[in-house]
Image (tube, rainbow, N blue to C red):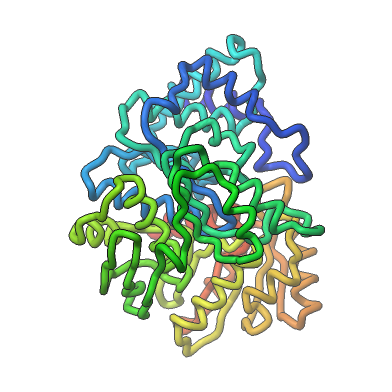
Amino acid sequence: MNLTAALRYLDEHTNLEATAGRAEGLSLDRMRSLVSALGDPQDAYPVIHLTGTNGKGSVARMVTELLRASGLSVGTYTSPHLERINERIAWDGVPIPDDELGRVIGSVAAVESVAGVTPSYFEILTAAAFTWFADNAVDVAVVEVGMLGRYDATNVANGAVAVLTNVGHDHTDGVGAWRQAIAEEKVGIVKPGATFVCGETDDDLRPILDTSPAESTWLRGRDFDCDQAILAVGGRVLDLRTPSGVVEDLYLPLHGAHQADNAAAALAAVEAFFGRQLAEPVVREGFAAVTSPGRFEIAGREPTVVLDAAHNVDGARACRRTLEEEFTLAGSVIVVVGMLGGRDPAEMLTELGATEAGFLIACTPDSPRAIPAPELAAVATSLGIVAESIPSVEDALERALALATPDDLVLVTGSLYVVGPARSALAREVEA
């Protein structure tokens, strides 16, 4: 297939990312049949498997760069994408080319009837990623879970290392013992004989996390951690500790105190994979190369433009904390925000610190799950925020930039479906 035909084929299949509601009848049977028909490409290389409510995308990028600095060929599978679907499947940090993406999706389409199943959009992409990594004989694949873990399509892979960044409030109705229920699903990616790198520190979840079939479990705070994080220009200077030793005064070029925890988990995961301590120059080289597009990314100056895909309460809280800790503004904050359903918009806006903003522009993400811009603006107004509604993400951003003075900060946030189009619009402006 060419890319156009491949994308058309994808769109003919159920896309759970784009639909709201509860998924029923969860099983890996369909995905197992699909990869079996492809020759089980996910077994052609070792896998580092990542799950968690927040941070797993950043950890995936850090793990990838540490492995590359160690001289390995690395496949990376993440989701969702910011601007182009190709971003989800990368080899040594470079997204899959259009023709290759069309080819591997075509490979999946060709075996659909043999497999005897009708896969979902995400299952097709996951199978395509596994196939491309096998075709390119990668040394290792870094694979990010799409949602939860146990029944996620990626869980047909047998991760040598499984990483849980944290357990937070997302993709849940929040009823009853929801944290325990989420933890049970996320720990489902841990396979017998694996090393489980656990970044969640809630003692109430310990009975669940301790039931994994891992050969060994490394706990944040006990076995690995960031012992010190000092604010620096453009990032932080960290002291990271793992069971193998300590790396001091390590520069990480990312904003946000939460990235220190992500860095500790990433280093622990790679050292667990190798079964040894990484050489200090390799660690420094790997972390120096890390970028995290759309995660508190500085995309413009005068006014300062920040893109942060905070899509849940924990992410919103981290965004606000980063603004407060790392930025001293002579002007005010103008918020461009859009959200998907399943969140409490008032809680999200409060945690973002939007009640302290000078102005808020609500927009509508390009998703069937989007909260309409007028509805979000009404919630903002009820909180005492000066707000208006502009449905188009691009138009909302243009309005914010027109209002902003050079001393102001424009924060674009609430969803990847907002940050992605805004990032593309800013890039087009630069090119023009």
The quadrant of the rendering that contains the C terminus is: bottom left
Report x, y in % for residue 344: 76, 65
Question: Which of the 4 image quadrants contains residue 340?
Answer: bottom right
Q: Is residue 186 above or below residue 398?
A: above
Q: Residue furthest bottom?
A: 330
Task: Say whether residue 126 is left or right of residue 96.
Answer: right
Q: Is residue 165 above or below residue 333?
A: above
Residue at 72%, 42% in the rendered image? 19
Task: Say whether residue 10 is left or right of residue 374.
Answer: left
Residue 309 visible to the viewer: yes
Q: Residue furthest top?
A: 114
Report x, y in % for residue 204: 66, 64
Residue nearest the observer in this picture, 96 or 430: 96
Task: Say whether residue 410 is left or right of residue 375.
Answer: left
Residue at 46%, 68% in the rendered image? 221
Q: Is residue 266 above or below residue 320?
A: above
Residue 431 visible to the viewer: no
Residue at 53%, 13% in the rendered image? 110
Residue nearest the observer in this picture, 176 or 131: 176
Residue nearest the observer in this picture, 42 or 80: 42
Residue at 64%, 23% in the rendered image? 30
Q: State the count of labels.
A: 0
Question: Which of the 4 image quadrants contains residue 134?
Answer: top left
Report x, y in % for residue 4: 51, 26
Report x, y in % for residue 277: 26, 55
